[in-house]
Image (cartoon, helix red, strand yellow):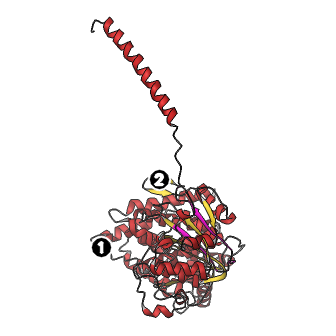
Amino acid sequence: MSEELQQKLRSQLWTVANTLRGNMSASDFMYFTLGFIFYKYLSEKIELHINEALAEDDLTFAEAWVSNDEELKAELKEECIQDLGYFVEPEYLYSTIISQIGKGEIIPQLERSLKKIEDSTLGQDSQDDFGGLFSDIDLASPKLGKTTKEKDRLISDVLVALNGIDFGLCDAHDIDILGDAYEYMISQFAAGAGKKAGEFYTPQEVSEILAEIVITGKNRLKNVYDPTCGSGSLLLRTAKSGKADQIFGQEKNPTTFNLCRMNMILHGIKYTDFRIENGDTIESDQFEDQQFEAVVANPPFSADWSAADKFNTDDRFSKAGVLAPKSKADYAFILHMIHHLDDTGTMACVAPHGILFRGASEGKIRQFLIEKKNCIDAIIGLPANIFYGTTIPTCILVIKKCRKEDDNILFIDASKEFEKIKTQNKLRPEHIAKIIETYRNRAEIEKYSHAATLQEIRDNDFNLNIPRYVDTFEEEEEIDIQVVMSEIKTLEIKRAELDKEIEVYLKELGIM
C-alpha cells in the first residue's frame, strides 16, 4: 500500500507543478511549488500535533485558540516551539488561506502567514533552522503574472490543487513517503533545469554509491557532513543509510540553502538534529575544526576560488605545501573535507578526472596525499553524462585517514556500465551493486578493477589516471590469412559458376 501511495503522491504533486506553471521555467517555478508544499506540511503537522495534545480535553486547535484560556494557549505555543521548532496560529494555517480563496486577494494574507512561521522562531533554538526559509518565495514576482489579479489567480490555483492532495501525515511511516515525493519533485525540476541543476541536485544513483561507501563497516554513524550540500539529497540519503544521529552541511547559494533546510524538515529530521549553514565553504568555513565520521560531497567541478595568500597558513591547506590553482578549486575542496574527516571516518566525493593526472600544484598535492598521508583508498570511474548540467566523465575519490602503510589503492572502471535513457546515462541497480560490492571486497576483476600497490603508484609518478591501472582494451581476434585466402578462392569459384549459369540462361532467351 505504501508503494502505491508513494507513486500516487509523486504523480499528483508533479502534475500540479507541471500543469500550472504555464510558460514559467521549471527552475523558476520550483521554489514556489516546493515552498507551498512545505507550508502545507508545516500547517498540517502543527494542527495534527495540537489536536492530538487536546484530544483528552475534547478540543481542537481552532476551538482552543478562540477560547479565553490564555494559559492553555501559552502552553500550546511553548510545546510546539519545543517539539516542532515553530508555531503558527490557526488564522495563518494553510487551511485558513484556502477558505479565503475567492473572497478577495489572498497574497497579503499568505505573505503574513509565511512570515508568522519564521517570526515564531526568533530567539529560539530553532531560529537558525527556520529563519528566512520562505525568503525566496517572491509573491510579487512578475513571473507569476502581469497584474495582481493574475498573480492571485495562479497562486490560488496552485494552493487549491495542492490542498486536494492527502500528505498522509496521520501515519508516521508516511512521512518518508512525503519526503520521497519531495525528493522526486526536486529531481524532476533538476531534469528540466539544465546546467543550473548541478548546483542543487546529485542524482540518487550517485548518492546511493557515496552513501554505501562511507557506511561500510559501520553499524551507525554519529554524524555526516557535506560541505557543498545543495538541496540536501545526498546528506539525507547518507544519514538514512547510516542511521546518522546528526546532519551537518554548508551551502553557498542562499536559495538552495533554504531548499535544503525545507528538505530536512520535510523528511522528519528534528531541528535539533541538523545544522545547515549558508556561506562559501572554502572562503568561510562555518565548522572550523569540527570533525565528522562520514563526509560526502559533489562539489562544483573545477570552480574558481581566491587561492589567497592567507590560505597558505590555513590548517586545511598548509600541510600540503601548495594551494590548488585559482581556476581549479577541486583540491581545495578535497583538502577541506580531509581536514573535517574523523580519524576513523570515510570520505567519498565526486570529482572531475583531471584531479587524477593534472600536474603543477595539483600533482604536488596528489603526491602529498599518497606518499605522506597515504589516505587515498579508492578511485572509481563513473560513466559520462550521468550528472545534470555536464556530460563529462567523473570519478569518486574515497579517502580514509588511518590506512596501513602497505595498503593498496583500489581502482574501479565503471565507466562502460550504464543504461542510456534519452539524453541521460543512468546507473541501474545492478551497476550500483557491482561498484559497491567490488569496493567492499576490494575485488580484482579483469577489465573492471585493480588493487594497485603504492609502488605501482610511485612507478607511475603518482599519476592516478584509471587506464594506467585497469586495462579495458579489447583485443581484436587474430586474423588467419590462410583462412581468408581460402574463403576468397571459394567465393571466386562460386562467382565463375554463377556467370556460366547466367550465360546459358541468356542464350536460351536468345539474347546472346
Residue 386, numbered circle: none
Q: x and y percent of residue 506 in the render?
A: 32, 10
- Find the magenta span and give its range: 395-416
Residues packed near mark 2 inside 10 Å, few (<14), some (14 to 19) or many (20 plus): few
> Type of residue at label 2?
Ile
Report, in whole angstroms, how far the alpha carbon at label 2 lies from the one at label 1.
36 Å
Quarter of the image for residue 83 reads: bottom right
Q: Which numbered mark, 2 or 1, is in the foreground of this view? A: 2
Q: Is residue 473 magenta?
A: no
Task: Name the residue tied to disc 2.
Answer: 421
* First reached walking from the N terminus: tag 2 or tag 1: 1
Residue under the image location 49 percent in, 66 percent down: 394
Q: Nearer the viewer, residue 57 or 9?
A: 9
Q: Is residue 127 above or below residue 484?
A: below
Q: x and y percent of residue 343 in the render?
A: 66, 83
Quarter of the image for residue 192 reads: bottom left
Residue under the image location 40 percent in, 82 percent down: 326
Residues packed near mark 1 inside 10 Å, few (<14), some (14 to 19) or many (20 plus): few
For label 1, the SS is helix
Task: Name the residue tied to disc 1.
Answer: 142
Residue under the image location 52 percent in, 90 percent down: 318
Q: Is residue 104 above or below residue 310?
A: above
Q: Is residue 380 above or below residue 376?
A: above
Q: x and y percent of residue 188 in the render?
A: 46, 62
